[in-house]
Image: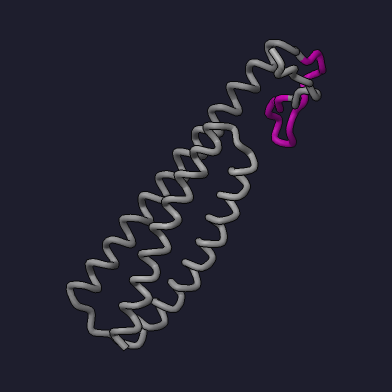
Amino acid sequence: MNGKYRDVLVSENKLISDVLCRQQALRDAVNNKDWTALMDAAGDVNEMMDAFNELDKEREELALGGLQEDAETYGLLAEIRGKLVKSRIENKALADYISITREFVKGIIDTAVPQSRNRLYSRNGYVVQPQPESVVVNTLF
């Protein structure tokens, strides 16, 4: 039973290492504006995380069986948790980068192509920013 538990931990550790590599590729694709690579990397990360979740469920079921955990098992668990934290930080950094970039581009477009519409209000009475109309940008220059 401990051997099976250790095998699941080793598989989880390898899988989360692969996820971290693909997250780096995802970040590079965003920075390089390579949208095909971005979609491929995002799909790979989602598939890997689904597989990781299945392995994690299996690990939890094995742990409920009352295992004797040793130093190696604790070490693997600590390494996996550390990699999960690193993955979460990478996701947050990427989300922040995308959010900041989106707001920056929106600000430039609002300045370059101001929208002359009436103010829109939400149900709660807050002013809602109107979305800009479609703008075609010539990238040849």
- Residue 141 highlighted magenta (yes or no): no
Q: Residue furthest front?
A: 140
Q: In the figure, residue 99 lies in which quadrant? A: top right
Q: Residue at x 50, y 72 (%)?
A: 54
Using the image, determine if residue 109 lies above or below residue 2.
above
- The residues colored magenta run 115-129
Q: Residue furthest left?
A: 71
Quadrant containing the N terminus in the rendered view: bottom left
Using the image, determine if residue 47 lies above or below residue 124.
below
Residue 122 on image: x %, y %: 73, 33
Q: Locate residue 17 relative to residue 23 in the image: left or right.
A: left
Q: Locate residue 61 relative to residue 40 in the image: left or right.
A: left
Using the image, determine if residue 36 lies above or below residue 137.
below
- Residue 124 highlighted magenta (yes or no): yes
Q: Residue at x 49, y 38 (%)?
A: 28
Q: In the figure, residue 35 lies in which quadrant? A: top right
Residue nearest the observer in this picture, 76 or 113: 76
| Color scheme of the displayed model | one colour
Q: Locate residue 41 relative to residue 128 in the image: left or right.
A: left
Residue 65 on image: x %, y %: 35, 88
Residue 86 on image: x %, y %: 36, 49
Please name the predominant secondary structure of the magenta segment in the image: loop
Residue 130 on image: x %, y %: 75, 25
Q: For the image shown, how many numbered marks are present on the structure?
A: 0
Q: Residue at x 56, y 49 (%)?
A: 41
